[in-house]
Image (cartoon, rainbow, N blue to C red):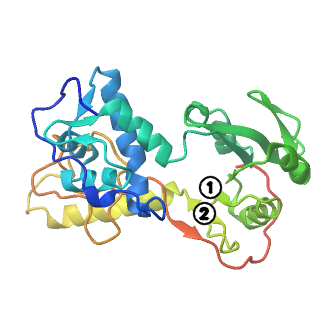
Amino acid sequence: MTPTSTSSGTPDDGPDPSGQPTAAGPRRIPEATVTRLPVYQRILEELIRAGTTTVSSELLASLARVNAAKVRKDLSLLGSFGTRGAGYDAAFLVEQIDRALGLDQVWPVVIVGIGNLGRALANSQGFSARGFRVAALFDTDTQVVGEHVGELTVRHLDELADVAAVTQPAIGVVATPAGAAQQVAERLVAVGIRSLLNFAPRVLTVPPEVLIRYVDLSIELQVMSFYQAREAASAPAGAEGPGPARTGVTGAPSDGDGEPGRGRGPAHRAGADMPIIRSVGLTSKGTSTGAAGSTAPGT
């Protein structure tokens, strides 16, 4: 696609042709790339709102705080649509990322545990904006069951199988206390859900075909404290404490191959070389199902 304008004076080498799909089907996309794609998407959408029509890999890399070669490699796995020496059509690139992430269709989601976190998730505009439709809400607390949260009524968890038969949920969100999370996960898997997003502070045991993403803010804070402590320990004697928080887009993960993302934006301090830690925790395929937890009131 020929770009109509440019947003950066830096040249772009275009995507690597080796990333083209083969006759056997699309190339496998590594998890590290998958977790960077939403970051690129968010940056591109902000640039488009600012009037940008074409973006170079150098600009995208600077804002995502990775190197340009990594951006080109990531995007080459989606196809060949950059223009050598000019860059990528921003709107078209967003469409391709959406398609790669499966956001060109609607995914029904159920949330179990309608406490403060569950309510916040149920009311999040980000779900529907990205193609995730909250189809049902569940809890076991009799004071919560029957309440209206947005346009939905909280159902008792015992109704999960009946509701799932109608709504056909693709993703189950576990927003319960840790003691209830395992049992909830098992019940979600039992009705056919094969993708779980777990906010409970515990590791879940599920069948190997089930994909789990863990979101635990305490883990993220501990990782950040590790780097803060290292930075403080390496500071020259008499130097001041940690500086102001870094700004810009966050969430781009390290590669998982020992090469963390490098801070390249204007907020990056010389010599800091602090990696950007992924904002969502571990992804794993489950193992055999373990013991059940307790009942599932919201948090």
Q: Is residue 152 above or below residue 29?
A: above
Residue at image point 26% right, 51% down: 71
In this view of the protein, can residue 278 be seen by the observer? no
* Residues at circles 2 and 1 in contact by the CB criterion of under 8 Å: yes
Q: How many marks?
A: 2
Distance, label 2 to label 1, CA atoms, is 6 Å
Kindly identify which numbered label has been placed on residue 212.
Answer: 2
Residue 151 in the image: x percent, y percent?
A: 77, 27
- Residue nearest the observer in this picture, 61 or 142: 61
Q: As shown in the figure, which amino acid type bears the numbered disc 1?
A: Leu
Residue 271 in percent (x, y) is at 10, 57
Residue 16 falls in image quadrant: bottom left
Name the foreground residue: 38 vs 76: 76
Q: Is residue 271 left or right of residue 140?
A: left
Rendering quarter of residue 47: top left
Q: Residue at x 25, y 50 (%)?
A: 15
> Viewer-proximal residue, 169 or 259?
169
Q: Residues within 10 Å of mark 1 (few under 14, many from 20)?
A: some
Q: Which residue is mark 1?
A: 197
Q: Position of residue 274 (x, y in %)?
A: 23, 58
Identify the residue at the far top of this view: 51
Instruction: Answer with left or right where residue 58 lies relative to residue 116.
Output: left
Q: Earlier in the sequence, mark 2 or mark 1?
A: 1
Q: Amino acid at mark 2?
A: Ile
Is residue 71 visible to the viewer in this orientation of the structure? Answer: yes
